[in-house]
C-alpha cells in the first residue's frame, strides 16, 4: 500500500545534523556554506542556515547552536516559498506504528490546547510562589501554521513558524488555558509582540523560559529571529493575572537586539528573585549565549555567556555583560537564585584548545553588578544522539537552590558502560547518563557526580514489537545485545520546604520503525513516500521523576514516546522541566507524541482534510511522592 510521510514542519533538511562538530550535513546547512577550490569555507552569516553551517563546520568545537535554531534554519520553509499554496497532497496512510498510543492518558494531562494537529515542544514551567495552584508553562508553539486566515493574498499558514507559546493553569495542573482560534482572530496565550502574526517584527521565535516574582507576575524569555536576514533578539514579556485568574501579557522588552550578521543570540533562560528576605527581591536575570562570527568570511569566533538584569519589574534591562571569563565556547546557560539573593549561573562550555568541556558556574552576591570567576563543577563528555534515534540533543545543565542554600545542578554526559566518563563520543560501550552534583558552600566545591536515575541507568532496554518482516521478506529481530538505558534532558526543582525533585527522559524501550525509501516531489514539508524502506530499531522514551528527599522514583509517562513524529523525528526540544510548588507537589513537563488528531491545514502545501497524525504535545503530570 502506498503511504505518505507527513512531516509537519520543514526541519527535514537538518534532521541529519549531529552533535559531532565538523560532521554537519543537510540541504540548508550546505546552502549556508560556499566551499572554495582551495578548501577554505566561507559562510553567509546573514542567514540562519549559514550560521548553523559555520558553527557545525568548526573543527574541534565542543558546542553547537541549539537544536531549536538548527531546526528553524531550514531555508526550504520560509514565507512565500510556495507558488501554488492550494496544491493538494492527498495522504493515504500516515507512517505510524501500531505500538503507539492514540491519546494522552490520565493521570498525565496535555497542556497544549490546539485541536488542529500543530506541534508544541521544548518545555519550561513555573509555579506562583504565593499560589501553588497557579502554574504557567512555556513552549515552542507552531499553531500559526494551522491558521486559515490570509494576509493580503498569502495564507497565514505560509507565515507559520515557531512561535513563543504559553498555557496556564489555576487548578494545580488539572486543566489548562487557552487555545488560539483557527482563523487567527484570537491568538490565545501566544506571547504578543515578538513574531509576525502576533504583532512583532520577527519571522520566528520560541526557546522559552518562565519564572514568577514575589508579587505573582510571571516573566517569559524567548528568542525572536529571522531565517534569511540577520535580525535577532532576546525578548522578555511580563504577564499579569487578573482577579478572575486570567493571564495577559505585556509588550516585549528586546535585549541585545541586533541586525548585525556577526551576532546571534541563542538559548536564553531567566529567573526572578521571589525570595522575601532577599536584598534584591524581584530582580529578573536573563542569561543567553552570544554567538559571534567573522562578518568577512562567516567563520565562528566564540560563544560567551551574557547576562542582563532588570531591577524595575522587567520594564528595562541592563546592558548585556559577559560573565564567562576565559570560557569562550559555551552554551546552555541556567541562572538560579538563592534565598539570600545570590545568583548562580551554570553552563556547558570549554576554554580554547580544551580536550574536554565542563559544567561551569559563576555567582553574583550584589544583585548582578559583579560576577565571580568561573568554577568547574564537573568535566563532561557532551552526549551524542541516543542510539536508534534521530533527534538532536545536548548536555545543558539544569539547577536549583534549596532553602538552606544547598545548590543542585544536573546535566548529561557520555558514560562508559564499565564506569566513569566515556573516553570518546560514541554509543559503542558508552551511553548517555543524567548526572547531578551538590554544593553546600556557595558553589566553591562540588560533590562527585551521581546518577539522577540510577535504577534506569543500571537497566537495559525492553524490546517490543519484534520480530517484523522486512520488505525483502527477511526478518528484523530484537537487538541481540541488550543496550543500557540512556537518560537525558534532566530537570531540577526544589520546593520551598526543601523537597528535591529531579527528572529526565529514559530511552528504556526499543521497537521496530519502518522508514521511507523514496520520496516523490515536491520536496517540502509534505513529502510523498512512494516506496517503503526497511524496518529499523527505534528507541522510545519514558519520562521519570525522582524525589531525592524520599528516595522514591516513578515513571510518570503512561506509555512510551515515539520520537519519530514531526520535524522528521529530528527535534523534540533542547530540554524538559519540572517545578515544585509551596505545597511540595511537583509538575513534570515534557514533550510527548502519543496524541492523535485529525488535521486540515498546510505548511507550504495543503493537506487532505481528516488526516490523522500524531502530535508533538506538551504534557504535564502533577503529583507528590
Image (cartoon, rainbow, N blue to C red):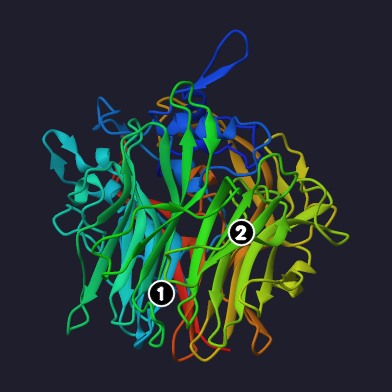
Quadrant for the C terminus, please: bottom right
Mark 2 vs mark 1: in front:
2
Tell which of 20 and 9 is nearer to you: 20
Q: Quadrant of residue 602?
A: top left
Q: Is residue 289 above or below residue 318?
A: above
Lateral position of residue 85 relative to residue 484, left or right: left
What residue does disc 2 label? Answer: 374
Q: Residue furthest right?
A: 418
Q: Secondary structure at mark 1?
A: strand
What residue does disc 1 label? Answer: 126
Q: Residue at x 58, y 34 (%)?
A: 56
Sequence-wise first label, 2 or 1: 1
Number of numbered callouts drawn: 2
Q: Quadrant of residue 119?
A: bottom left
Lateral position of residue 435 relative to residue 286, left or right: right
Tell which of 187 and 341 is nearer to you: 341
Q: 10 Å neighbourhood of mark 2: few (<14), some, or many (≥20)?
A: some
Q: Secondary structure at mark 2?
A: loop
Q: Residue at x 25, y 27 (%)?
A: 84
Lateral position of residue 316 relative to residue 302, left or right: left
Q: Residue 26, percent across and down?
A: 54, 30
Q: Residue 94, percent across and down?
A: 47, 45
Tell me, yes or no, if residue 224 can be seen here: yes
Tell which of 83 and 327 is nearer to you: 327
Q: Residue 513, percent across and down?
A: 63, 48
Q: Quadrant of residue 225?
A: top left
> What is the C-alpha distance between the residues marked 2 and 1?
27 Å
Q: Residue at x 64, y 36 (%)?
A: 21
Q: Residue 545, percent across and down?
A: 60, 76
Q: Is residue 436 above or below residue 93?
A: below
Amino acid at each position: 500500500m502506498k503511504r505518505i510521510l507527513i512531516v509537519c514542519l520543514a526541519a527535514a533538511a537538518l534532521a541529519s545534523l549531529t552533535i559531532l562538530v565538523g560532521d554537519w550535513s543537510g540541504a540548508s546547512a550546505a546552502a549556508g556554506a560556499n566551499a572554495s577550490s582551495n578548501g577554505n569555507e566561507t559562510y553567509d552569516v546573514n542567514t540562519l542556515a549559514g550560521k548553523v553551517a559555520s558553527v557545525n563546520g568548526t573543527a574541534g568545537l565542543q558546542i553547537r547552536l541549539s537544536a531549536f535554531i538548527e531546526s528553524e534554519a531550514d531555508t526550504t520553509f520560509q514565507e512565500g516559498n510556495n507558488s501554488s499554496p492550494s496544491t493538494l497532497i492527498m495522504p493515504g496512510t500516515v507512517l505510524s506504528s501500531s505500538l503507539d498510543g492514540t491519546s494522552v492518558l490520565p493521570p498525565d494531562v496535555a497542556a497544549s490546547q490546539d485541536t488542529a494537529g500543530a506541534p508544541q515542544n521544548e518545555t519550561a514551567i513555573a509555579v506562583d510562589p504565593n499560589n501553588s495552584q497557579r502554574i504557567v508553562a512555556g513552549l515552542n508553539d507552531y499553531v500559526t501554521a494551522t491558521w486559515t486566515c490570509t494576509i493580503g493574498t498569502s495564507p497565514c499558514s505560509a507565515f507559520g513558524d515557531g512561535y513563543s507559546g504559553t498555557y496556564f493553569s489555576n487548578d494545580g495542573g488539572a486543566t489548562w488555558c487557552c487555545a488560539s482560534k483557527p482563523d487567527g482572530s484570537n491568538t490565545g496565550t501566544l506571547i504578543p509582540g515578538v513574531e509576525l502574526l502576533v504583532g512583532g517584527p520577527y519571522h520566528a521565535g520560541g526557546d522559552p523560559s518562565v519564572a514568577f516574582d514575589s508579587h505573582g507576575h510571571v516573566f517569559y524569555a524567548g528568542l525572536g529571529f529571522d531565517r534569511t536576514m540577520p535580525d535577532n533578539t532576546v525578548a522578555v514579556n511580563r504577564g499579569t493575572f487578573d482577579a478572575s485568574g486570567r493571564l495577559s501579557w505585556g509588550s516585549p522588552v528586546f535585549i541585545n537586539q541586533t541586525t548585525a550578521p556577526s551576532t546571534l543570540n541563542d538559548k536564553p533562560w531567566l529567573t526572578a528573585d521571589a525570595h522575601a528576605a532577599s536584598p534584591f527581591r524581584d530582580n529578573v536575570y536573563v542569561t543567553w549565549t552570544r554567538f559571534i562570527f567573522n562578518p568577512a568570511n562567516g567563520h565562528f569566533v566564540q560563544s560567551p555567556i551574557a547576562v542582563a538584569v532588570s531591577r524595575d519589574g522587567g520594564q528595562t534591562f541592563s546592558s548585556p555583560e559577559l560573565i564567562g571569563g576565559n570560557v569562550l565556547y559555551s552554551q546552555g546557560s541556567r541562572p538560579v537564585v538563592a534565598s539570600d539573593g545570590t545568583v548562580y549561573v551554570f553552563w556547558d562550555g570549554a576554554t580554547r584548545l580544551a580536550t574536554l568541556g565542563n559544567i561551569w558556574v559563576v555567582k553574583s552576591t550584589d544583585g548582578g553588578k559583579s560576577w565571580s570567576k568561573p568554577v568547574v563543577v564537573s568535566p563532561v563528555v557532551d552526549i551524542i544522539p541516543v542510539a536508534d534515534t534521530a533527534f538532536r540533543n545536548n548536555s545543558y545543565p539544569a539547577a536549583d537552590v534549596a532553602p538552606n542554600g544547598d545548590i543542585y545542578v544536573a546535566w548529561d554526559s557520555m558514560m562508559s558502560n564499565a564506569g566513569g566518563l566515556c573516553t570518546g563520543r560514541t554509543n559503542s560501550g558508552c551511553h548517555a547518563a543524567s548526572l547531578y552534583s551538590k554544593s553546600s558552600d556557595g558553589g566553591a566545591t562540588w560533590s562527585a557526580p551521581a546518577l539522577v536515575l540510577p535504577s534506569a541507568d543500571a537497566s537495559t532496554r525492553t524490546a517490543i514489537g519484534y520480530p517484523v518482516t522486512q520488505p525483502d521478506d527477511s526478518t528484523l529481530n530484537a537487538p541481540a545485545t541488550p543496550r543500557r538505558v540512556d537518560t537525558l534532558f534532566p530537570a531540577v526543582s526544589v520546593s520551598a520546604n526543601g523537597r528535591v525533585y529531579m527528572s529526565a527522559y529514559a530511552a528504556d524501550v526499543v521497537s521496530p520503525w519502518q522508514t521511507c525509501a523514496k520520496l516523490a516531489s515536491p520536496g517540502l514539508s509534505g513529502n510523498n513516500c512512494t516506496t517503503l524502506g526497511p524496518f529499523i530499531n527505534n528507541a522510545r522514551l519514558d519520562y521519570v521523576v525522582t524525589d531525592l528527599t524520599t528516595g522514591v522514583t516513578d515513571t510518570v509517562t503512561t506509555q512510551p514516546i515515539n520520537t519519530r513524529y514531526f520535524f522528521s523525528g529530528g527535534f523534540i526540544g533542547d530540554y524538559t522541566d519540572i517545578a515544585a510548588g509551596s505545597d511540595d507537589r511537583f509538575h513534570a513537563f515534557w514533550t510527548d507524541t502519543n496524541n492523535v488528531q485529525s488535521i486540515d491545514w498546510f505548511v507550504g502545501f495543503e493537506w487532505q482534510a481528516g488526516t490523522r497524525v500524531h502530535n508533538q504535545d506538551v504534557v504535564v503530570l502533577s503529583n507528590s511522592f
